[in-house]
Amino acid sequence: MIEFDPVLVHEWLSRSAARTPDKTALIAEGRRIAYREIDEKCERCARALIELGVRRGDRVIVLLDNSIETVIAIYGILKAGGVFVVLEGSMKAGKLAYILSDAGGKVLVTHTDKFEVVKECKKTFSTLEYKTLWVDGAKGNSFGADEYEWDALLDKQRAVGPECRPRIIDVDLAALIYTSGSTGEPKGVMSTHHNMVSAARSIIQYIGNEPDDVILDVLPLSFDYGLYQVIMAFMFGGTVVLERSFTFMTSVLRRAATEGVTGLPVVPTAVAMLLKTKDFSRFDLSKLRYLTNTGAALPVGHIMKLRELLPHVKILSMFGLTECKRVCYLPFEEIDHRPASVGKAMPNCETRIVDNEGRDVAPNKNGELVVRGSNVMQGYWNAPDATSRSYRAGGYPADRLVYSGDIFRSDIDGYLYFVGRRDEMIKSRGERVSALEVESVLCSMQGVLEAAVVGVPDEILGQAVKAFVAAVPGARVTAAEVLRFCRRNLETFMIPKQVEVVRRLPRTPHGKVDKKLLVSVLATGGNNT
C-alpha cells in the first residue's frame, strides 16, 4: 500500500509518533518528552479546547514563553480544528487586547506568571469575551468564570475520537502570525496548512535535515523563524531543544554541547553575541552540523569570523518574511565567494525584482522583491486594504504574488542581495519593530509632546531602536524616565537602546518629521540603556 505524506501540520506529528514513539521530541527546562507522549497530550488538549467551545476555524491565542506547554497548545489547537495565534511572552495588556479583539480569540492559553497582564487586559477592555486556560494554576491565584486550569482540564480528557474530530483540509487556516506593520498596528498573516507544510518542506530540503538532527531553538515561538524549527523537526522526526532566548550565550553554548546539537538557527544579534563569547573553545560543538540565518543579512565580517571559529559547520544564509516564510537561500559552496548574498529562490518558489511599474529590473539595479509560490500566505486578517497592497494577482490564472516592500538587487548570475526596507521598519535582534508603534507608546507618556523613532546601525543588534522625544512646553522629561516608561509598556525587543530628548523635531516642507535629518544631524550622544 502506498503511503502518502500528510497534508496537515499536525498530521506530521502523529506520523512521527507512530514511527518513533519513544524518541525524544522536545527538551525544555530540564524536561524531556517523547513523540508518543506529546502527541497524546496534544490530543487531550484538543479535546479540552473542543469542550471549551472551540470549533473549526476558531482562533485560540497562546501567550506563553518557549515551553513544552506552548508546543502542546499549538498542536492541540490544530487537532481541534482551530487556528493558533502565538504571541510574544513579554506582550503588554494593550497589545494583547488589540490582538484578542482583532483575531476574535475564543480562548486564551497563558501562564499564571502573566496573571497581572491578563488581569489588566480584562479590566481595561471589559467588552472582550473569551475563556482563559491557565498553565501552572497552582500559585494561589483565584480564577473566575470562564477560567480553567490547564492540568486539571487536560487530565480528565481522552483522545479526540472520530465523533468529534473536525474535518480539516489543507486550504484551511492553521495560524495567524502577527507581525508589526508600517501602519503601527500589528497585522495577522493568514497561513494555511498547505502554506506552512510547503514552506517547511522546502527548508528541510535545502538544509538536508535527517531524523538524527537535534535543533537548538533559542528564538521565540511567536517569531515564525522559531516556530518553524518545531514544525520542521516534527516533520522529519528530529529533536528540538527549546530555550527562552539567546541572551545568555554561555548557557546556550553549554546546552548545545550537552545535548549534542546539530543545528543552530540564529539571527545576526545572536551571532554577534556568540563571537564575543570568551573561551569559546571550551564548548564541544563537534556535532554541530549547520547554522542558519534568516532574520536579516549577516554582516560579511561575522560570516568570515564564523568560518574561522567553526570550520566544520555549514553556514546557511537565507532570507524570508512572514508573508511568505522563506524566500531564498545561498548554497553553502557560495558562502566564501558571495558572503553578502542571500542566494536564490528556495525550491518551489519564484522571485522577481521589479520597479515601481512592476517591470523586471536589470542585474545590479535596485527594485522591490516579489515572491510567487505555495509559500505565499493568504493575506492579512481583517485588513483588506493592506492585503490588496501587498498581495496581488500574477500573470497566470489564480496566480498570487506578494510584494515584499524590501529592496533587493541581483548580480549577473541571479544571486540576490538585500539592500534595505522600503518602509520604516526596524530590524532589531532579528525582530521587526514598527517605528510608529513605538512612537505611539512614547506619545502616551505624560509630558511627551511628540516622538520619532529610527533604526541606527548597531554591531550587536543589527539595528538599534533610537527614540527622539520632544516634551510638552514647560514639562521636564528625562531619557531615564522615558526608558522606564518603555520597559513598562513595550516588549523587550522594542525598547529603545538610545533616547535623546530634544527641544523640537525637525520637519520637511510638507510638515512631516524629517527622520533623515534626525539620523544625520541629531544622532549624537544618545543615552544607552
Image (cartoon, rainbow, N blue to C red):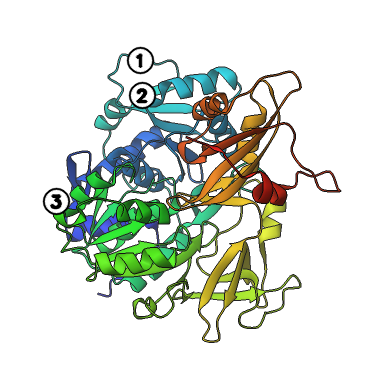
* Above or below: residue 272 compared with residue 330: above
Distance from Cα at disc 3 to Cα at disc 2: 30 Å
Q: Confirm whether residue 176 shows in the render.
A: yes
Quadrant for residue 65, please give it. top left
Q: Which mark is residue 258?
A: 3
**Amino acid at dot 3:** Thr
Is there a contact, CB below 8 Å, between mark 2 and mark 1?
Answer: yes
Quadrant for residue 303, please give it. bottom left
Q: Which label lies toward us, 3 or 1? A: 3
Q: Secondary structure at mark 2?
A: helix
Assess disc 3: are there few (<14), some (14-19) or many (≥20) residues with their C-alpha within 10 Å of its C-alpha: few
**Amino acid at dot 2:** Thr
Decide which of 177, 301 is in the foreground and name it: 301
Upstream in sequence: badge 3 or badge 1? 1
Q: Confirm whether residue 160 shows in the render.
A: no
- Residue 417: percent from left, percent from top: 53, 72
Please tell me which residue is depicted at 65% across the width and 49% down the height of the picture: 519
Distance from Cα at disc 3 to Cα at disc 1: 37 Å
Is there a contact, CB below 8 Å, between mark 3 and mark 2?
Answer: no
Residue assigned mark 2: 112
Please tell me which residue is depicted at 58% across the width and 19% down the height of the picture: 124
Upstream in sequence: badge 2 or badge 1? 2
- Residue 449: percent from left, percent from top: 72, 28
Please tell me which residue is depicted at 52% across the width and 33% down the height of the picture: 490
Q: Which mark is residue 141?
A: 1
Q: Secondary structure at mark 3?
A: helix
Please tell me which residue is depicted at 47% across the width and 34% down the height of the picture: 529
53 relative position to 271: left or right = right
